[in-house]
Image (tube, helix red, strand yellow):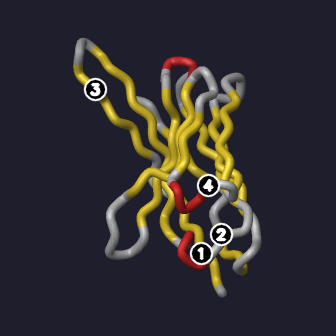
């Protein structure tokens, strides 16, 4: 069972920065895509950014130009650098990946890390 452990959340003022990390218990080379999602109170969990094994990235429109995502396949870790944070970025941030075994897709989620941005 793959375990994903997020860290780096916290409270910052608007305009500040945070760097989230997600450490995988297994080699991330096994996973094509690693991603970050977020869920604010009363809202659905939405994709923030993801990155493929080849380094192709995708971002939600709301974070383009402010967030970057990277992966370290040696450290089995994916990072989310968040700059110019806004109060609307406040949410629990979750790390995600998936794989396919015998034709069955399996999703893996971390427990989440809270990010709070004050105005």
Name which residue lies at 57% across and 50% down.
6
Distance Cα–Cα, label 1 vs label 3: 32 Å
Q: Which residue is identified by label 3?
A: 105
Name which residue lies at 44% across and 51% down.
47
Distance Cα–Cα, label 4 vs label 1: 19 Å
Compare marks 3 and 2 and give the one earlier in the sequence.
2
Marks 2/1 in contact by CB < 8 Å: the verdict is: yes
Q: Can you tell which of label 4 and label 1 is closer to the viewer? A: 4
Image coordinates for residue 46, horizontal then vertical, percent: 40, 56
Within 10 Å of disc 2 (Cα), the crowding (few <14, some 14-19, many 20+) is: some
Q: Is residue 54 left or right of residue 106?
A: right
In the image, 117 versus 8, the foreground residue is 117
Q: Which residue is identified by label 2?
A: 10
Q: Which residue is identified by label 4?
A: 64
Within 10 Å of disc 3 (Cα), the crowding (few <14, some 14-19, many 20+) is: few
Compare marks 2 and 4 and give the one earlier in the sequence.
2
Distance Cα–Cα, label 3 vs label 4: 29 Å
Name which residue lies at 49% across and 56% down.
112
Q: Quadrant of the C terminus?
A: bottom right
* Residue 101 vertical placement versus 21 (above, below): above
Compare marks 1 and 3 and give the one earlier in the sequence.
3
Distance Cα–Cα, label 3 vs label 2: 32 Å
Residue closest to the far bottom: 119
Q: Can you tell which of label 3 and label 4 is closer to the viewer? A: 4
């Amino acid at each position: 069972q793959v375990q994903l452990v997020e860290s780096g959340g916290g409270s910052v003022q608007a305009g500040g920065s945070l760097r989230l990390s997600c450490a995988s218990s297994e080699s991330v080379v096994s996973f094509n895509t690693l991603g970050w999602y977020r869920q604010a109170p009363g809202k659905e969990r939405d994709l923030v950014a993801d990155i493929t094994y080849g380094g192709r990235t995708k971002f939600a429109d709301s974070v383009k130009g402010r967030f970057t995502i990277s992966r370290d396949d040696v450290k089995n870790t994916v990072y989310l650098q968040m700059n110019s944070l806004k109060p609307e970025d406040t949410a629990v941030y979750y790390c995600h990946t998936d794989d396919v075994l015998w034709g069955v897709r399996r999703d893996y989620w971390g427990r989440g890390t809270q990010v709070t941005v004050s105005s």
